[in-house]
Image (cartoon, rainbow, N blue to C red):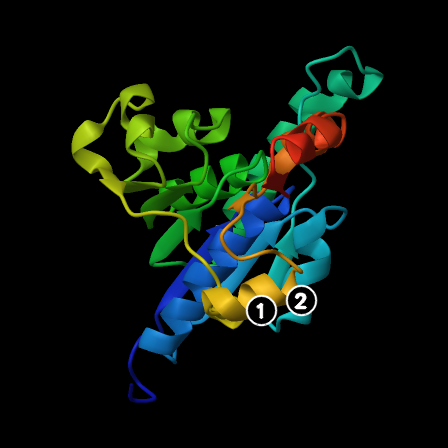
Amino acid sequence: MSGKATQYKVLFAGGGTGGHLFPAIAVAEQIKELKPGTEILFVGTKSKIEGKIVPKLGYKFKSIWIKGFSRKFNPENLLFPLKLFVSVMQSIIINMKFQPKVAIGSGGYVSGPAIFGSSVMGAKIILIEQNSYPGITTRLLERYANEVHISFEDSKKYLRKKERTILTGNPVRKNLGTENKITALEKFGLTPGSKTLLVLGGSLGAASLNKAVANNIAKLERAGIQI
């Protein structure tokens, strides 16, 4: 790209948990590889995982005030309308200054105001959905999206714009690497040929999933299953 050329700018919004953040980072890495001159900005909240991880990876980061609405009674819920309004205003200002060509939302409440702000500024909107049942933010933002990339075929039935929905899979960071089966079995101390149960949870459901498996370890081991 020449010095006079308009720099390609991509805004990412999403976080709260690693399940929303790390797929966005994987996409950002791929964009930088395909188009090295691209300027990338992440929008999130300072107090969540994105506020700690994104700056460490060398990406620009802007924070907004938004906090999720608790489904249980919480006095902080009374501040939600104010926080939402302020976050939308912050997002519009961030988008006015950054002027993204494309905005990519990867889920979590923080992506709502940020991606809405991008749509107001005329950016192309792309959503990434990791869950089989799309989150509320994805379902609300779908109306503004040019494309919605899903990880499970089953997700389509919950989305209205079928023609804009693409089955892509869940983006994975390249630095995670790959291992062959024999090396992996040795690394985890597993017996070749035995049935193996992989417990893999994400987001807020991970703790309850781990507890359920922990409570049934003896039963699984008696059935000859290694975990």
Residue 55's tag is 2
Residue 55 image offset from top left, x and y in percent: 67, 66
Spot the residue most to the left. 163
Q: Residues within 10 Å of mark 1 (few under 14, many from 20)?
A: some
Asked if one can make out residue 44 in the rendered structure from this viewpoint, the answer is yes
Calculate the distance from the C-alpha at mark 1 to the C-alpha at mark 2: 6 Å
Q: How many numbered tags mark residues here?
A: 2
Image: 131 above or below 139: below
Residue 44's tag is none
Query: Where the N terminus falls, by quadrant?
Result: bottom left
Image: 170 above or below 134: below
Q: Nearer the viewer, residue 215 or 15?
A: 215
The residue lying at 60 percent from left, 44 percent from top is 90
Q: Give the residue type that dot 1 points to.
A: Tyr
Q: Give the residue type that dot 2 points to.
A: Pro
Image: 195 above or below 179: above
Residue 225 image offset from top left, x and y in percent: 60, 38
**Figure quadrant of residue 154:** top left
Spot the residue most to the right. 75
The residue lying at 65 percent from left, 41 percent from top is 16
Q: Residues within 10 Å of mark 2 (few under 14, many from 20)?
A: few
**Figure quadrant of residue 53:** bottom right
Q: Are marks 1 and 2 in contact (CB under 8 Å)?
A: yes
Residue 59's tag is 1
Residue 171 image offset from top left, x and y in percent: 41, 54
The residue lying at 72 percent from left, 32 percent from top is 217
Is 71 on the left-hand or right-hand side of 89?
A: right
Q: Nearer the viewer, residue 84 or 192?
A: 192
